[in-house]
C-alpha cells in the first residue's frame, strides 16, 4: 500500500519497526552463533498482575516465561511469535495498516514436513484467530509495543465530540462540527495530533445512548467539554485517547456510568487497566480518572448530602441487585484502588441496600436535569468518587 | 447318530416305567461293580470327551502327547504327523456326511513292545508313566478314553502300527476295549519285517466329531505345541486338505527327564507301606536314605532320633502307630528340597525361539525359575513374554498355558495361571491395554496338580501361584525397561520432528526481522538459506537425535534435514 503517509504516522512506524528489529536481534545472534535461542517474555497471567499504588495502575509483575525453540512444548509458539513479528514488521515498513484479522490470514498457512518414515505431513501455522490474537499479545509484551503503536487496526467503537480540533491522517477535524454524528476514535489514537483545545474537562459516559442525548443537548458546548463514550466496555483506542487527553492536555476526566458493579468496573478499566491485560495499562490507563456517578449517595443521600431522587422515584427506578452483582461488588472490595474511604462507603451502601440504578433513570427525570443540573453540579461541588 | 438316539429312547422308557415317587422301596436297591473302563465309558466327559467337538480335539491331543512322550522324553528329535480325514466308508454306511473322522498320528518315537500294545491301548489305567518323572502322560487313561469314544460312536477298533528302535519287525494291532472287563479285544494282528530303519508308532482312531467347531481349537493346539517344541517337526493335514507344516527350528532339546525317587514330603501312608514291601532295606536308616530322595544317612539318623524311632529297626516290623508317626513327622521335617534334575524345563532359549516363530514379536524374553517344591513334588515355572510386532492388540494378555509341555486351551479362567496373570497390574510395566501382549507360562513337574483328568486347568497351589507371579513379574520388568527405552526413543523422534519442521518458517521470519528498517530490502533466498543452515546445525547439535532406520546416524544434520528437505514453503 503506497498511500501518502503523514509525518506522525511515519514517525510511529519507524519507532515501532526499530524496536522490533532490535528486540529480535538477540534471537538472530543466538541462531548464528549456535546458541539455543529463547524469547524472554513477561508473563501475562493474573498471578503476575499487581497494582502499582504510585502510578495508580495495574502493572505486570516480574515473572517472565522463557520460550525456547528447543523445547518441544514451546517450539510451535516460538515459531508463531517470530512469524507474527515478521508480518507486523514488514507491514510497518511497507506502510500498511493490517487488522488483527489480516494478521491472522497473512500468517496462516500450511507447514509441510516429513516424518522420520518419510511420509509427508501438514500443520497450520495457526488455526483459529484466537490463536493468532494470543500471539499478537505475546509480540506486544515481548516488544513492549502495543498494537496501536504497531499500527494494527481493530474495530472502532469509541466516539468523541467536543470543543477541540485534531489532525488525523493529514486532515484537520473539528470535533465540534460533527452534526448529530461523532468522530469515531481510530484504532491508532497515537497518530492523532491535538490542535486547538477549548475544553475544560472530559466527560466519559458508559452508554452510547446517553452520549447521543448529551450530544444533541449540546452539553459539551455549554459546559466547555469533550464528550467521549466507549459504548460499554471501552476498547483500547478509547482508553488510550482518554489517557492522552488527560496526560497531554491536563484535562480532568469524569466518568459517568450506571450505578452498579458493572459500571464501576468500566470506571476501573479506564482508571487502572484491565485485570487480564495489565501489560497495556502502562499506556492505556488513566490513573487520575474520577468516578462522577451515579453514586450510591446520589440515590440515597449521605449525612448532609441530599439525594437526587425522591422517595417515590427511588421506589420506581431502583432495581434490586442480583447475586452476581453482590458477588462482583465483594470482588471489587478486595482491589486496593477501591479501598479509599469514599469507595468503601459506596460499596457498603450498595451491599446494605442491594440496590442498582441505571443512568437512564436520571435522564427520565428530564434530559435537562441530567445535563444542566446533575452533571454540572456534581463537577462544581467536587462530588466525585476516587 | 444311531447310538445316541437309542440312548434317549431308553431314557424315556425308564422314566415312563418308573413308579411314583416315595413308593420305591429301599430294599430293592441293587449292587454291582463296574470296571474302570465302563466307568470312563459312562463318564466320558471326565476325560474331556463331552461332545463331538471336544472329542475330536481331545483325541488329537492325547495322540500327539503320547507321540511327544515317545520322542523328546527319550532324546529323539520328534517328527510328528497328524492327519484328520473324513471317513468315507462310514459316510456311505450311515449317510450323515462330514461327521465321521479318522484321526491318524504318527511319530518316530521308541515304539511300543508288541506284547504291550494291546494293554497300552486297550486296558484303562495301564501305563508306562506311573513313575516319578516329568511326562505329558500321567494317568494311563488318555488314549483309551479316545479308543472308547471311537468304538462307542463309530464302532471301529483302534489301529496301532508300531516298531521299536532295536526291533526288526513292525507290528499291527486292531483292537476294541471290552468295557465290562476292561480288557483289550484284539480283532486283527500282523507283523512284518522292517525294510528301512523306521521306528515309532502310528495310531488311527475313528470317531464321530464336529470339525467346523473343533477346527480353530485344534489348529491352536497344534500351533501352541509348535511354540513349546520348536525342536519338533510337525505336519498337520485337515479334513479339508489344508496342510500346516512347522519345520524344526533347532535341534537343541531340553535334557530328557529322569526318573526320581519319592521325596519324604510327598509320601503318604500307603506309599510308605508299598515302599517298605518293595525295598530290601534292612533298617529304617537304610530305607530312608536309599529309597527317598534328598535324604542322606546323617539326615536320616538325625531325623529318626528326633522323632524317637530306632534307626536300626527293621522297617518290615514297624507297627502301625510308628508308621503313622514316621510318615506324619516326615511331612513337616526340614529335609532338603526335592531334586529337580529329573525335571525337564524347556529353557529360555527354546521358549524365545518358539514365541518368535509364532508371533514375530518386536520383543521377547523368557525366564526359567529355579526348581521349587510343593507337597514333596518338585516343579519349575517358566515364563515367556512377547510384545508387539505381529501380535494383535487385545484387551487382555494372550495367555499361553502349558503343563509339562502340554498346551492347555480349555477352562482358562479356572487356571491358576489366569488368576495370576489377570491379577497383574500391567500399567506398572508400561503396558496399556489394548496391547499386543503374549504371556506364556509353563509348569513342569513330576506331578501337575490338574483340576481334572481332562488336563485342562491347574489348581491354585500356593507355591506354584507364587512362582508364576515372581516369574511373570521378573520378565515383565524387562519388558518395562524395553518399553521405557522405546518410549524415550519415540519421544526423541517426536521432539526432533516437532522442532525441525519449523526451521524454514523460523528462518524466513528471522530473515525478515534481521533486515534493518531503514534501507529496507526484502531478504534474499541466500539470507534464508544461511539461517536454515544455522538452525539445522543448532538443532542437530543440541537435541538428542534418535536412531532412524534407513538413515545415517553418524550425521545428525541429515536427519534434521530429512524433515524439511525438498519442501517448498507456501
Ligand atoms: N505313540 C506312542 N509311543 C510309545 N508308547 C506309547 C505311545 N502311545 C501310548 N504309548 C504307551 O501307552 C501307554 C498308555 O497311554 P495313555 O495315553 O493311555 O496313558 P498315559 O500317556 O500313560 O497317561 P495319560 O492318561 O495321562 O495320557 C503310555 O504310558 C505309553 O507307554
Ligand atoms: Mg497319554
Image (cartoon, rainbow, N blue to C red):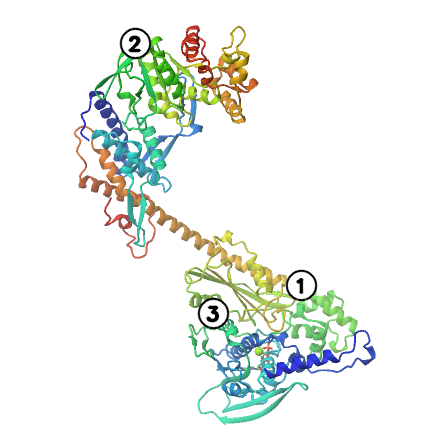
Residue denoted by label 1: B334
Nearer the observer, disc 1 or disc 3?
Answer: 3
The part of the image, by quadrant, that contains residue B412 is: bottom right
User: In which quadrant is the N terminus of chain A drawn?
Assistant: top left
Residue denoted by label 2: A198
Left-right relation of B194 to B151: left
Spatial CA distance of label 1 from label 2 is: 112 Å
Residue denoted by label 3: B227
Q: Chain of mark 3?
A: B
Numbered disc 3: secondary structure: helix
On the image, the x and y values in percent for residue A29 come to 25, 34
Res. B371 in view: yes
Q: Chain of mark 2?
A: A
Give the class, few, some or many, for how many residues have Cα within 10 Å of label 1's Cα (few <14, many ≥20). Answer: few
Numbered disc 1: secondary structure: loop
Ligand 1 rendered quadrant:
bottom right
Q: Residue at x 76, y 67 (%)?
A: B308
Relative depth, front residue between A326 and B299: A326
Q: Earlier in the sequence, mark 1 or mark 3?
A: 3
The reply to the same-chain question for discs 1 and 3 is yes
Q: Is mark 2 within 8 Å of ligand 1?
A: no
Amino acid at each position: 500500500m503506497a498511500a501518502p503517509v503523514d509525518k506522525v504516522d511515519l514517525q510511529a512506524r519507524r519507532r515501532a519497526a526499530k524496536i522490533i528489529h532490535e528486540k529480535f536481534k538477540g534471537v538472530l545472534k543466538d541462531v548464528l552463533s549456535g546458541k539455543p535461542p529463547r524469547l524472554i517474555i513477561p508473563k501475562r497471567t493474573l498471578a503476575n498482575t499487581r497494582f502499582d499504588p504510585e502510578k495508580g495502575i495495574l502493572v505486570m509483575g516480574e515473572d517472565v516465561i522463557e520460550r525456547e525453540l528447543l523445547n518441544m512444548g514451546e517450539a510451535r509458539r516460538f515459531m508463531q511469535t517470530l512469524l507474527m513479528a515478521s508480518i507486523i514488521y514488514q507491514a510497518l515498513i511497507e506502510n500498511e495498516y493490517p487488522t488483527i484479522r489480516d494478521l491472522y490470514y497473512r500468517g496462516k498457512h500450511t507447514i509441510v514436513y516429513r516424518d522420520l518414515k518419510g511420509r509427508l505431513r501438514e500443520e497450520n501455522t495457526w488455526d483459529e484467530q484466537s490463536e493468532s490474537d494470543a500471539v499478537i499479545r505475546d509480540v506486544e509484551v515481548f516488544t513492549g509495543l502495543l498494537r496501536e503503536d504497531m499500527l494494527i487496526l481493530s474495530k472502532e467503537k469509541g466516539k468523541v465530540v467536543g470543543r477541540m480540533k485534531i489532525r488525523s491522517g493529514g486532515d484537520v477535524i473539528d470535533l465540534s462540527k460533527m452534526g448529530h454524528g461523532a468522530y469515531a476514535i481510530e484504532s491508532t489514537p497515537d497518530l492523532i495530533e491535538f490542535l486547538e483545545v477549548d475544553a475544560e474537562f472530559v466527560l466519559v459516559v458508559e452508554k452510547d445512548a446517553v452520549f447521543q442525548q448529551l450530544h444533541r443537548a449540546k452539553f459539551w458546548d455549554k459546559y466547555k467539554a469533550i464528550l467521549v463514550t466507549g459504548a460499554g466496555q471501552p476498547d483500547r483506542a478509547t482508553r488510550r485517547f482518554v489517557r492522552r487527553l488527560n496526560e497531554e492536555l491536563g484535562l480532568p476526566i469524569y466518568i459517568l456510568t450506571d450505578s452498579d458493579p458493572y459500571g464501576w468496573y468500566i470506571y476501573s478499566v479506564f482508571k487502572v487497566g484491565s485485570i487480564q491485560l495489565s501489560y497495556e495499562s502502562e499506556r492505556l490507563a488513566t490513573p487520575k480518572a474520577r468516578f462522577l456517578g451515579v453514586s450510591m449517595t446520589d440515590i440515597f443521600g449521605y449525612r448532609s448530602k441530599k439525594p437526587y431522587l425522591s422517595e417515590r422515584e427511588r421506589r420506581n427506578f431502583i432495581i434490586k441487585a442480583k447475586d452476581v452483582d453482590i458477588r462482583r461488588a465483594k470482588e471489587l472490595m478486595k482491589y486496593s484502588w477501591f479501598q479509599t474511604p469514599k469507595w468503601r462507603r459506596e460499596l457498603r451502601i450498595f451491599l446494605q441496600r442491594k440496590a442498582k440504578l441505571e443512568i437512564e433513570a436520571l435522564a427520565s427525570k428530564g434530559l435537562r436535569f441530567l445535563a444542566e443540573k446533575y452533571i454540572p453540579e456534581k463537577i462544581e461541588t467536587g462530588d466525585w468518587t476516587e | 447318530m444311531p447310538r445316541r438316539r437309542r440312548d434317549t429312547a431308553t431314557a424315556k422308557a425308564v422314566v415312563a416305567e418308573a413308579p411314583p415317587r416315595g413308593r420305591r422301596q429301599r430294599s430293592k436297591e441293587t449292587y454291582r461293580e463296574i470296571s474302570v473302563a465302563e466307568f470312563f465309558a459312562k463318564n466320558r466327559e471326565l476325560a474331556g470327551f463331552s461332545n463331538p467337538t471336544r472329542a475330536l480335539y481331545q483325541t488329537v491331543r492325547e495322540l500327539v502327547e503320547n507321540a511327544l512322550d515317545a520322542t523328546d522324553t527319550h532324546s529323539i528329535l520328534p517328527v510328528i504327523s497328524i492327519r484328520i480325514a473324513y471317513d468315507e466308508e462310514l459316510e456311505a454306511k450311515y449317510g450323515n456326511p462330514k461327521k465321521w473322522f479318522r484321526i491318524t498320528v504318527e511319530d518316530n518315537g521308541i515304539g511300543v513292545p508288541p506284547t504291550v500294545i494291546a494293554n497300552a491301548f486297550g486296558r484303562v489305567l495301564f501305563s508306562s508313566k506311573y513313575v516319578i518323572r516329568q511326562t505329558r502322560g500321567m494317568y494311563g487313561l488318555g488314549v483309551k478314553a479316545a479308543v472308547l469314544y471311537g468304538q462307542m460312536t463309530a464302532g471301529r477298533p483302534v489301529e496301532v502300527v508300531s516298531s521299536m528302535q532295536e526291533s526288526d519287525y513292525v507290528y499291527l494291532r486292531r483292537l476294541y476295549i471290552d468295557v465290562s472287563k476292561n480288557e483289550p479285544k484284539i480283532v486283527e494282528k500282523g507283523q512284518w519285517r522292517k525294510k528301512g530303519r523306521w521306528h515309532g508308532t502310528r495310531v488311527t482312531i475313528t470317531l464321530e466329531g464336529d470339525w467346523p467347531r473343533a477346527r480353530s481349537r485344534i489348529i491352536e493346539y497344534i500351533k501352541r505345541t509348535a511354540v513349546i517344541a520348536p525342536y519338533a517337526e510337525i505336519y498337520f493335514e485337515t479334513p479339508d486338505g489344508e496342510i500346516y507344516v512347522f519345520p524344526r527350528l533347532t535341534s537343541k532339546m531340553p535334557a530328557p527327564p529322569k526318573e526320581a525317587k519319592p521325596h519324604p514330603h510327598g509320601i503318604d501312608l500307603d506309599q510308605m507301606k508299598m515302599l517298605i514291601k518293595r525295598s530290601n532295606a534292612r533298617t529304617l536308616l537304610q530305607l530312608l536314605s536309599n529309597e527317598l530322595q534328598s535324604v542322606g544317612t546323617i539326615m536320616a539318623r538325625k531325623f529318626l532320633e528326633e522323632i524317637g524311632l530306632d534307626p536300626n529297626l527293621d522297617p518290615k516290623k514297624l507297627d502301625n502307630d510308628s508308621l503313622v508317626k514316621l510318615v506324619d513327622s516326615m511331612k513337616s521335617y526340614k529335609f532338603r528340597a526335592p531334586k529337580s534334575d529329573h525335571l525337564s524345563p524347556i529353557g529360555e532359549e527354546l521358549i524365545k525361539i518358539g514365541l518368535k516363530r509364532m508371533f514375530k514379536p518386536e520383543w521377547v524374553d523368557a525366564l526359567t525359575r529355579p526348581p521349587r517344591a510343593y507337597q514333596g513334588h518338585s516343579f519349575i515355572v517358566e515364563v515367556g513374554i512377547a510384545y508387539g510386532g505381529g501380535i494383535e492388540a487385545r484387551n487382555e494378555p494372550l495367555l499361553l498355558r502349558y503343563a509339562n509341555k502340554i498346551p492347555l486351551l480349555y477352562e482358562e479362567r479356572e487356571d491358576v495361571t489366569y488368576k495370576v496373570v489377570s491379577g497383574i497390574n500391567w500399567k506398572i510395566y508400561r503396558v496399556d491395554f489394548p496391547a499386543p501382549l503374549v504371556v506364556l507360562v509353563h509348569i513342569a513337574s513330576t506331578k501337575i496338580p490338574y483340576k481334572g483328568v481332562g488336563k485342562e486347568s491347574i489348581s491354585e497351589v500356593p507355591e506354584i501361584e507364587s512362582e508364576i507371579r515372581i516369574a511373570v513379574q521378573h520378565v515383565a520388568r524387562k519388558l518395562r525397561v524395553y518399553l521405557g527405552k522405546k518410549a524415550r526413543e519415540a519421544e526423541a523422534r517426536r521432539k526432533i520432528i516437532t522442532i525441525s519442521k519449523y526451521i524454514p518458517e523460523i528462518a524466513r521470519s528471522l530473515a525478515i526481522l534481521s533486515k534493518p528498517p531503514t534501507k529496507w530490502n526484502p531478504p534474499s533466498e541466500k539470507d534464508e538459506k544461511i539461517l536454515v543452515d544455522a538452525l539445522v546445525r543448532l538443532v542437530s547439535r543440541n537435541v538428542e537425535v534418535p536412531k532412524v532406520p534407513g538413515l545415517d546416524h553418524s550425521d545428525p544434520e541429515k536427519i534434521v534435514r530429512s524433515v524439511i528437505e525438498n519442501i517448498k514453503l507456501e
